[in-house]
Image (cartoon, helix red, strand yellow):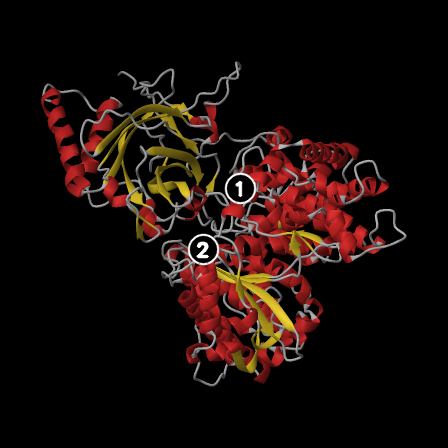
Amino acid sequence: MGSLTLQYFSSCDLGPPLNDESILPCIKIMNLSGFHPEKFKVVKGSYLPLACYGEPRISYCITKIVPHLDCCIISPWCETRHCSSERTLSDVRRFDEVIELPLPYNALYDYNGVCFVLSSTYTDEKGVHEQLLAGANMPLYNSKKVFRHGIYELELHPLEPLGIRRLEDIERIVRDPKFDSKPVGMDQLNKIMKTNRKHTRDELFDTPLDRHTRSDAERAIEEAKRSSGRLFLSIEFQFSRNQPNLNIPVIFERREIEPLASDTRAERWNPVDEKYFKMTRSLRVADVDRKRKPNKETLDRLMGILDQPPARDLPEADSDLVWQHRFYLAEKYPEAALAKFLLAVRWEYPEQVEQAVELLHQWPVVAPEYVLELFNRQFIHLAVRRFAVLRLHAARDEELLLYLYQLVQALYYENWHDILSTPVKPMDCVATASGLNQTSQNADLAERSPQEDQADQGVENLPPNLSSPRKPVDTRNVSVRSPHSPRSHNSQSLIVEIGGRWMEALKDRWKEDLTTFLIRRALCSWPVANYLYWFLRVELDEPLSPASEMYTHVLELLQSALYQGNETQRAWYKELVRQSIFLADLLQFIHKVMDGPGDRIRKIERLHSCFKEAEFAHLKHIEEPLCLPLEPNVKVIGIDAPATNLFKSARQPVFIPFLLPSGGQYKVIFKHGDDLRRDQLVLQMIELMDVILRKENFDLKLTPYKVLATGSGHGFVQFIESQSVFDILQKGTILGFLQQNARSSTDPLGVQKEVLETYIRSCAGYCVITYLLGVGDRHMENLLLTNDGRLFHIDFSFLFGNDPKPMATEVRLTRSMIEAMGGANTSQFGEFWKITFTAFLVLRRHANLFLSLFSLIQNVSVLPTPRDYTNACEFLKERFCINQTEERAVHRLASRMTEAIKSVVPDIMERIRAFAQFMRP
């Protein structure tokens, strides 16, 4: 009797051979059918005739979908060439391009997939932008754990209805079954394609009728695609580039690991290997790890890991090393090691989760700034985020305000289902919710701040789900498309499956989520309540954002908590309502002034005359003092109407001097038609840098003036009495300006010593800050100087190296600025260099804090690039010289400053700008 031989490859055997040439799976992208550009002309709710005008391209990457965990993109996005200009049909675009996946077979697991995104371009008044059209995700292995082979028809799903406009957001919808590439409701098409693949793989015997029916099958496929009206991408899986037609199946298989091979195993990346982790990270070896002390070589490796900037994942060798020495690191380096330890934990294994949570209970107290990274997208486990919230309790209001905007942005990565399931009490009912259990409150007494203890009365009136320990809801199965959809059976059973001792921590000490914490602190502090309200209000100006509903609900929870709080908190609620009404009336007033005909002079006249109308009399005279949204501790009683003015710029912002009860004025600039969120972010960073430098007893005389975006197209800016350097140079020199306002008969330069020192320090400070943040468009009208010598920058529309002018220098330092210090050969200029380098090194030691803060910014409108925080963080790493020594970092800054001094292009651009300004009416 004959024997049957079955040939197949094990995926674990298809790795790099001895000649270092990996066998990489290939995919041939054949064509795109059903593509009608008119369907993609609507961008952000507006019809754009120039949308989708470029030839379509296909971007692709490898995804990792671990059960019960959010998807993680584990390879860079790659892109095909443009489709061929030859079109066989009106709705078909041909690519015929073979791509190699970036990982070999032995590194691809049964949870890996490949995600395809169709993109094009569109243009508006701001220029050309990338436009994501449609996409889909496809598992690399089929249900029988066989690597796919043959031709597939993938259905691409439109991304505009999902609010997806950047590749990084794809990660949040890959797990959605509706994003799967298999055509739904097209059984005949799927059956024909499956049969064709079996013929290709020689799984079916050939018959004489095959050659007659093959053309009919192809016509049936094309007819099914055309009649469905859907978008299809035709691809073909091939074994490798050198052997595309090899039909031997690749079966997914993990290689068993011998106990003695654990040392060599740690040197290779293997994302999931249950047996390995059970051997090396079990409770049986925890006692050994507790006593483990690193030798000098190991300690150097650990220090290198801790010095790395915030990252998505740790290499497996680094992860194992951190895990083995977790007790030592927690004792010796608790602040630097916290995030790295949590990245080393494999949260899909309950045994590791139990050990990690137990160690977090024993972790030494760290400063709030070190837990900000834990609110990012890579830390999705409920216990981690609740632990981070607990550590934030120690932050004073002044510290919290420095990070409040990022914490509001971090709500994007919270459990939306948990937030949306919290009911909002009607505003006209009396609060009856019971407060927190006093016993559980006492357990957190040591962690609470004094500000929280003062607001216990208001805390009693939080909505029920916010004021009492809630049943933890899994944070890992929330769809971006439908964050309010009911929980699936799988996610509910997951709680039972992974629920262990760590769940008790959520009911005891770690009971607050980020939303609850922010609202609780808002009930404790009027400035926190004010800024939290306006930060949430701004997020509502993105109606197509997938998070719009979530932010709306958080705002309603905040308003409800204030309204139903104590007498003080209800007064705060009424004040926020008055601010909103005042802003609406002010916008109506500004629109009436600006919408009329005439030049700037005519509009200024109309501005003054409108204040005399009865319709806007309440703006000029405010009956009850109003807290300014920009500065909530400042109350105003009206506007000095005759002193209002329009600035001489393209948008013509309005100068508004508010009247104070004491008789003084608080002057602001109200900008309309400009998105101030970027300026707000930069000024927040400048204020944070000022705080850091002052803690080092290093005052650089910075001017972090207030900026508040009250919407995506308007906001307030604090006005500082000053003159632009452009105007000063038109009349004379900077040194002459300082001599005029602070003359000294004893100083060699004729300037009071304190004023000259203030000028030197502020000039050095802003040179460093604008260099680190890559601030562009630094013409002399964006540099202002006060009478007491404080130089500061305004208008931060261009960041991270973007600049509208050609050949712009990285540091804005001109000869006229140096001459005000006495010249390049004076002791004052030498002191300027010393101050600059010292400030740079001080801020460089806090580089990870700034990287963490920028990584929390999920709103692309804030960042100047079409991608999210990735480009910004990479730019900051370069400017902070993360992986270089202090000497090399200082040398780089010194060389950039020298280039700025020698460059003549900025002077030429200034003269061109001066001429344009002269011609402007």
Percent position of residue 166, x then y = 42, 44
**Among the 4 quarters of the image, the one containing residue 491:** bottom left
In the image, taking residue 641 as reference, residue 836 lies left or right, namely right
Please determine whether, in this image, residue 815 is positioned above or below residue 5: below
Q: Which kind of residue does numbered mark 1 sit on?
A: Thr
* Quadrant placement of the N terminus: top left
**183 or 663, which is in the foreground?**
663
In the image, taking residue 543 as reference, residue 35 lies left or right, namely left
Residue at 53% in and 77% down: 575
Residue at 45% in and 55% down: 494
Residue named by callout 1: 870
**Among the 4 quarters of the image, the one containing residue 307:** top right
Which label was assigned to residue 713?
none
**Most distant residue in the top direction:** 19
State how far apart marks 2 and 1 are (Cα).
32 Å
Q: Nearer the viewer, mark 2 or mark 1?
A: 1
Q: Earlier in the sequence, mark 2 or mark 1?
A: 2
Percent position of residue 132, x then y = 36, 42
Residue named by callout 2: 494
**876 or 221, which is in the foreground?**
876
Percent position of residue 230, x then y = 22, 42
Q: Which kind of residue does numbered mark 2 sit on?
A: Leu
**What crowding class fits label 2: few (fewer than 14 Cα within 10 Å), some (14-19), or many (20 or more)?**
some
Residue 283, visible in the rendered structure: no
**Among the 4 quarters of the image, the one containing residue 528:** bottom right
Please tell me how many numbered marks the rendered image carries: 2
Percent position of residue 480, x then y = 40, 53
